[in-house]
């Protein structure tokens, strides 16, 4: 027997787009948010494109709510789109695990075109190498501040000779001339970073708020590190969230952020600055439990779409 869900009860129809927003192409983008999936950028040969199915899984987890898209969303204090839907889903980019340069260029150029057309790119990855070309896509459009939410600092110069992989994301972002500041939140446990990588980041002016510091002092301390009025790109590696709510990641670590930590951070950023871009990466559906992680990730994206709709 087919599994029943809330969509069955509410009358939702099958949809391939995020929560049923219109599908379209780059030529249709005009303000609001433009969602697209980026299954792969620069995978390490040892693991390949292990997050390639994440965009479909995250869209699938929220599809049951498409009939209710104009209903009250209590996270946002009103419907996701208070003045009618102003978001579009561009589908997933093509990718080839054996052609990382082409993957990166597709991501970079798509982001650049979205920004040029006055919209906010909302990118569903894919592994954590995706933010490198995603952030690079803003290069011709002004100056930006990056907030990374992640269990790991991703500040290796290279791993196995690869400088554009998932362990080097924030070092590469720091090196981009259009990035004028960087805050990283959620660090915990052991990752690829060595002591010198951490010291390098601090010497470069990167500000850190660990998961332990958030647990003891709250999320406002992170919001306070974001300058007022800046254009902010948020990079969310979902292993920042506790594995009890997002189990489907390759690098689980206990003591992660809560759903509300992340949502309050996003709302706090939008309250003092402009939310100019967002990506969510590192979700591995094969390790998820009953779509719990996919749904938490999808709900975070709903908040992003709602915040963008309110700043347009």
Image: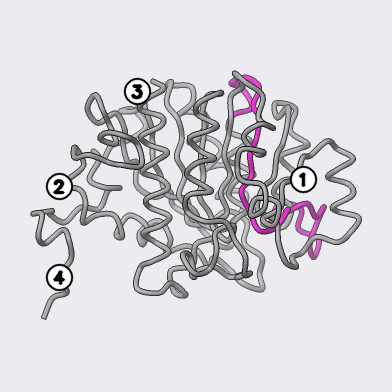
Q: Are marks 2 and 3 in contact (CB under 8 Å)?
A: no
Q: Residue 67: give its label.
A: 2
Instruction: Decide which of tag 4 and tag 2 comes sooner along the chain.
Output: 4
How busy is the neighbourhood of tag 4: few (under 14 within 10 Å), some, or many (20 plus)?
A: few
| Alpha carbon distance from label 2 to label 3 | 24 Å
Q: Are marks 4 and 2 in contact (CB under 8 Å)?
A: no
Q: Secondary structure at mark 4?
A: loop
Vertically, is 181 above or below 44?
above
Q: Secondary structure at mark 3?
A: loop
Q: Position of residue 3 (x, y in %)?
A: 17, 74
| Alpha carbon distance from label 4 to label 3 | 36 Å
251 within the magenta span: no
- Residue numbers of the magenta segment: 138-165
Instruction: Decide which of tag 1 and tag 3 comes sooner along the chain.
Output: 3
The residue that mark 1 highlights is: 171
Q: Residue placed at 60% from the left, 70% from the top?
A: 252
């Amino acid at each position: 027997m087919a599994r029943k869900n809330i969509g069955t009860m509410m009358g939702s129809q099958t949809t391939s787009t995020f929560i049923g927003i219109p599908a379209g192409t780059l030529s249709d983008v005009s303000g609001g948010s433009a969602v697209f999936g980026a299954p792969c950028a620069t995978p390490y040969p040892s693991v390949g494109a292990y997050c390639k199915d994440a965009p479909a899984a995250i869209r699938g987890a929220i599809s049951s709510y498409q009939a209710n898209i104009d209903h009250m969303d209590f996270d946002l204090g009103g419907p996701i789109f208070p003045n009618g839907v102003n978001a579009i889903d561009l589908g997933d980019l093509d990718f080839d695990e054996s052609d990382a340069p082409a993957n990166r260029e597709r991501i970079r150029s798509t982001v650049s075109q979205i920004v040029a057309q006055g919209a906010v790119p909302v990118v569903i990855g894919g592994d954590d190498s995706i933010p490198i070309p995603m952030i690079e896509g803003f290069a011709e459009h002004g100056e930006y501040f990056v907030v990374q939410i992640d269990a790991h600092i991703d500040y290796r110069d290279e791993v196995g000779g690869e400088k554009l992989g998932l362990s080097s994301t924030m070092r590469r972002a720091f090196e981009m001339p259009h990035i004028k500041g960087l805050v990283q939140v959620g660090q915990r446990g052991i990752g690829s970073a060595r002591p010198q990588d951490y010291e390098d980041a601090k010497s470069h002016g990167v500000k850190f708020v660990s998961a332990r510091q958030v647990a003891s002092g709250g999320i406002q301390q992170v919001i306070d590190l974001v300058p007022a009025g800046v254009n902010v790109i948020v990079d969310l590696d979902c292993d920042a969230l506790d594995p009890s709510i997002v189990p489907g990641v390759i690098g689980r670590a206990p003591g992660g952020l809560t759903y509300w930590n992340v949502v309050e951070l996003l709302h706090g950023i939008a309250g003092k600055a402009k939310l100019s871009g967002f990506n969510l990466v590192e979700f591995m559906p094969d390790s998820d439990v009953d779509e719990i992680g996919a749904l938490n990730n999808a709900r975070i994206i709903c908040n992003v779409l709602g915040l963008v709709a309110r700043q347009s």
